[in-house]
Structures are given as structure tokens and as C-alpha cells.
Image: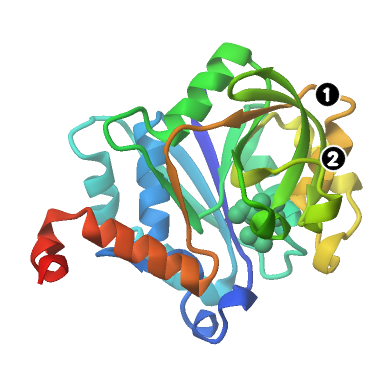
Amino acid sequence: MIRKLVIPAAGMGTRMSPFTEVLPKEMLPILDKPVIHYVVSEAYDAGIDDILVVTRSPKTSIINYFTKDVIDSIKGKSGRNLSISFKIADDTKGLGDSIARSEEFVGSDSFLVMLADTFYRNPGGVSVTSQLIDAYSKEKEPLILVESVPPERIKAYGIIAGERLSDNLWVVKDAVEKPEPEKAPSNLAITGSYIFTPEIFDFIKKTKPGRNNEIQITDAIRELCPKSRMLAYKYKGVRYDIGTIDLWIRAFLENAKQDRRFAEYFNR
Ligand code: G1P
């Protein structure tokens, strides 16, 4: 049911400067592949076949990376199509604005948004992106992926206020971008995967610059949720956020330790 994915990758990568002057954070390697590869591959395996990457012109390495060989390797023997297109947005005013640049690509379809500085693993189980798409097929309402975070991580994320429907499902009542822990409405953090209907674009257009003077997708959700039902889904699995150097090191090492190719190195 969901075939389109938008990857907003037009940020400046300020938190990870100076290397982000020349290398987009989405291109940081986890073992032998950049993070964005894992994001595209998991989305493709969950049924996505049409992807738009919104990026900025100094970040051409993302565009160069997705050669025919790489796309073929992601497709494997599935026999399904995979189209990846790019939109340059040098003047983007934040995450919400980058997502807004996909309006033409999205058309009238519900669509998936995934940030490419986060990827998931659920060994032996259903992939996290498939869980989100399955939940959408069942609920038929827009969904945000969330996880519980400890108090000290709250101010790194968008945080929702929710009314619990079941073990892993909430109705979103509010969303606040990077609150102080004592002011946060809960500990449920937005992890960076969303399923929207095109209605979100009207709300982004009405959203004024918020935190960091940027147009935040969390603020658009805040405006949308009292008017249109939106759900939050808590996934099963492990998430690797590579948005800061310490988190990237953790992601790299944990993935290396689980990979047989490097067993000898870690058992030394
Ligand atoms: C963005 C969003 C935030 C979300 C986070 C997930 O923040 O603005 O709401 O919780 O991604 O990683 P960023 O990490 O780009 O600062």
C-alpha cells in the first residue's frame, strides 16, 4: 500500500562538523556501506519502489553512490523495480521544509518519510519499516514511529503526548520538538520514520520557524494532530542513531561485533 519514500537529506550536518563540510552524515559508513544504503534497502524490502532523496548540491556523494550496480544489489533477485530520484534543495529552511519539497513527487499517495541518520535491526523478526507499514495497512491512519527514551535523551528528539490504545499504539495528542525533560509531555521520542498523507503539506506551509529558526516537521504534526487523527507506533527491534559521533561509534562497533567477517578481530 505504501510505495513511495521521501528521504530528507538536505541538512548541514552541523552537529558533526567539520567532516560534514565534505562528507554528508548519511554517507558515514557502517562496516562497508553508508547508512543511507541500509535505509534504502530496508525500505525496498518492505515494499517501497519509488524513492526521492531531497538533498543539497555539496552533498553529491549521495547521488554518486546510487549507481546501477548498487541499485541492482539492493534489488537482488526480487524482480521488482526500484527508482531513486534526487531533488536539490540548497535553500531549505529545515526538516519540515525539506519534506515539503517532495509534494510533487508524492502526488495524492500516502507516503513514508525516513531520516537517513538512523537505521534499524530486528534480527530474526519483521523489519522495523515493515512493522510500520503493516501497522498503517491495519489502521489506515498516518503513523509516527516512536520509542521510549531515558530522560537525558529527551532533548535530542521530538516528543509526543499520546493517548494509549494498546501495547504499542497511541493517538498523538501533541508533539514538541526537543523539549527540556521536565517540560516533556512523555518519554516517547519520534525516531525519524513517518507515514503521512499529502495533507501534511498544508500544515507544513502554515508552520512558522521554530527550534533553531527552522521549519520543524514536529511543529507541523503539532498543528495537524488536533484536526486529523494521527497514531504513534512503538516498534520492536533495535535502532541505531548515527546523528552524533559517539552514537555512530556505538552503531559501527555493535554492527561489527555481530558480523562474522570481523569475529577474529573482536576475539583477539
Ligand atoms: C530530527 C527531528 C526530531 C526527531 C529526530 C530523530 O531531529 O527534528 O523530531 O526526533 O530527527 O532522529 P534531528 O536529529 O535532525 O536534530
**Where the C terminus falls, by quadrant?**
bottom left
Q: Please say if 22 is above or below 13.
A: below
Residue 197's spot in the image, x, y percent?
A: 69, 29
Classify residue 88 by image quadrant.
Answer: bottom right
- Residue at which label 2 appears: 222
Residue 215's spot in the image, x, y percent?
A: 81, 57
- Residue at which label 1 appears: 228
Quadrant hosting ligand 1: bottom right
Q: Please say if 154 is above or below 29.
A: above
Q: In the displayed structure, does residue 94 sit left or right of residue 208?
A: left
Q: Is residue 78 something one can see in this rendering?
A: yes
Q: Residue furthest top?
A: 138
Q: Please say if 227 is above or below 117.
A: above
Dot 2 crowding, Cα within 10 Å, few <14, some 14–19, many 20+? many
Dot 2 beta carbon under 8 Å from ligand 1: no
Cα distance, mark 2 to mark 1? Answer: 10 Å
Q: Residue at x 11, y 66 (%)?
A: 267
Residue 103's spot in the image, x, y percent?
A: 69, 42
Classify residue 143 by image quadrant.
Answer: top right
For marks 2 and 1, give the one nearer the viewer.
2
Q: Secondary structure at mark 1?
A: loop
| Amino acid under disc 2 | Arg
Q: Residue at x 59, y 20 (%)?
A: 167
Q: In the displayed structure, does residue 109 sit left or right of residue 130?
A: right
